[in-house]
Image (cartoon, grey):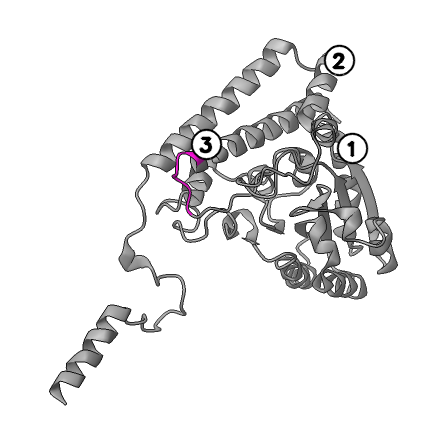
């Protein structure tokens, strides 16, 4: 760990936290596209994994993937605009919070289906291997996907074909309102991955440097054709979605989980090791807040997409757009009148 790298990881985590807080504000202002927003507050140590990746690496995310995308270099203004359903968002406002993608940054797509994006990295891994590019592809998903069969098919293929792939489970302890030990008969998830022949590790999601150390070893091996699995043991600070008050958790449990704050751990280490002063860290916090205030204001002021663009980017080039229902009804009524 270098001082510069550790400070940069803290900066990225703080930007993610501030961004997610502004996403919550966007929702409360009634400016978000749709009613389902899944915040990644408490999971910021995923930066240890995103920081271990290189330019050109690809990835997929789940429906709680804002932090992952920011960790890979996303523009928060464009991202906030997408969540607001605006024209200058990453997907012209059509993807919203759960379907953001950007191939320029290697983002092969977020997916609202639990485990839905996992098999995409198998295909990407085949491409990387065949091209000899030295790149890897990483699937980011939550603990709920550990009960999805598509994950195990993908793990098996990656191990069998020695693909440069990593499966990264951000275990925040809950799938919607169900605690992980109530949905999985055996919670040693790295052992499952090892059974398929993958390199596997678990890292403390309150410690971004521990995550980065584990991710560094796994990415190095994956680039040499030894696929891996990383579980980041985190805690979801808030409910499943923005409107979920998490009545299934006790106040005591939530207080204990929030005490494992990855930003608090990183901040304390940076100060204790003399890497940054409280003034330095306060400046980083202030910069992140100001940046995300601007992103929020930009998203609110941005222009919605025109209705005429509704079917663009949906069908293959050259495919006629569907006729509006009103036009079809008028045609039917006109034909009936002539008859």
Left or right for 181, reference 139: right
Does the segment drawn in magenta span residue 35? no
Q: Which residue is mark 1?
A: 210
- Name, please, the residue furthest toward the left: 338
Mark 2 surroundings within 10 Å by alpha-carbon count, few (fewer than 14), some (14 through 19), many (20 or more): few
| Mark number displayed over residue 272 | 2
Q: Residue 217 location, x and y as percent?
A: 80, 42
Q: CA distance from mark 3 to mark 1?
A: 31 Å
Q: Main secondary structure of the magenta part?
A: loop
Q: CA distance from mark 3 to mark 2?
A: 33 Å
Provide residue 263's location: percent of width, then percent of height: 66, 25
Q: Quadrant of residue 251?
A: top right
Badge 1 element = helix
Q: How far apart are labels 1 and 2 at the CA level? A: 17 Å
Residue 247 lies left or right of residue 29; in this view the side is: right
**What numbered label is drawn on residue 25?**
3
Please give the range of residues in magenta.
Answer: 28-33
Badge 1: how crowded within 10 Å, few (<14), some, or many (20+)? some
- Quarter of the image containing the N terminus? top right
Classify 332 as above or below 38.
below
Look at the image and tell me whether residue 221 can be seen.
no
């Amino acid at each position: 760990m270098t001082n510069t790298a550790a400070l940069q990881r803290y900066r990225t985590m703080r930007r993610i936290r501030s961004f997610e807080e502004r996403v919550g504000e966007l929702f409360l202002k009634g400016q978000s596209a749709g009613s389902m927003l899944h915040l990644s507050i408490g999971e910021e140590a995923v930066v240890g994994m995103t920081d271990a990746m290189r330019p050109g690496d690809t990835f997929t995310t789940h429906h709680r993937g804002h932090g992952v995308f920011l960790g890979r270099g996303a523009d928060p203004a464009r991202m906030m605009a997408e969540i607001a359903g605006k024209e200058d968002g990453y997907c012209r406002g059509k993807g919203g919070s759960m379907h953001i993608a950007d191939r320029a940054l290697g983002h092969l797509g977020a997916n609202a289906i639990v485990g839905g994006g996992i098999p995409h990295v198998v295909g990407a891994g085949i491409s990387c291997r065949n091209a000899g590019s030295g790149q890897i592809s990483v699937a980011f998903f939550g603990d709920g996907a550990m009960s999805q069969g598509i994950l195990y098919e993908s793990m098996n293929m990656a191990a069998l074909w020695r693909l440069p792939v990593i499966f990264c489970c951000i275990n925040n302890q809950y799938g919607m309102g169900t605690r992980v030990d109530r949905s999985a008969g055996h919670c040693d998830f790295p052992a499952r991955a090892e059974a398929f022949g993958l390199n596997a590790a678990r890292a403390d999601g309150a410690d971004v440097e521990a995550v980065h150390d584990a991710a560094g070893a796994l990415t190095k091996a994956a680039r040499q054709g030894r696929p891996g699995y990383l579980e980041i043991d985190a805690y979801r600070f808030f409910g499943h979605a923005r409107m979920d008050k998490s009545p299934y958790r006790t106040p005591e449990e939530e207080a204990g989980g929030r005490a494992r704050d990855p930003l608090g751990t990183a901040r304390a280490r940076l100060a204790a090791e003399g890497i940054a002063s409280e003034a330095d860290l306060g400046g980083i916090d202030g910069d992140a807040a100001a940046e995300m205030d601007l992103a929020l204001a930009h998203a609110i002021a941005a222009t919605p997409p025109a209705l005429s663009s509704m079917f663009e980017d949906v069908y293959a080039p050259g495919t006629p757009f569907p006729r509006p229902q009103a036009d079809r009804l008028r045609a039917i009524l006109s034909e009936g009148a002539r008859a």
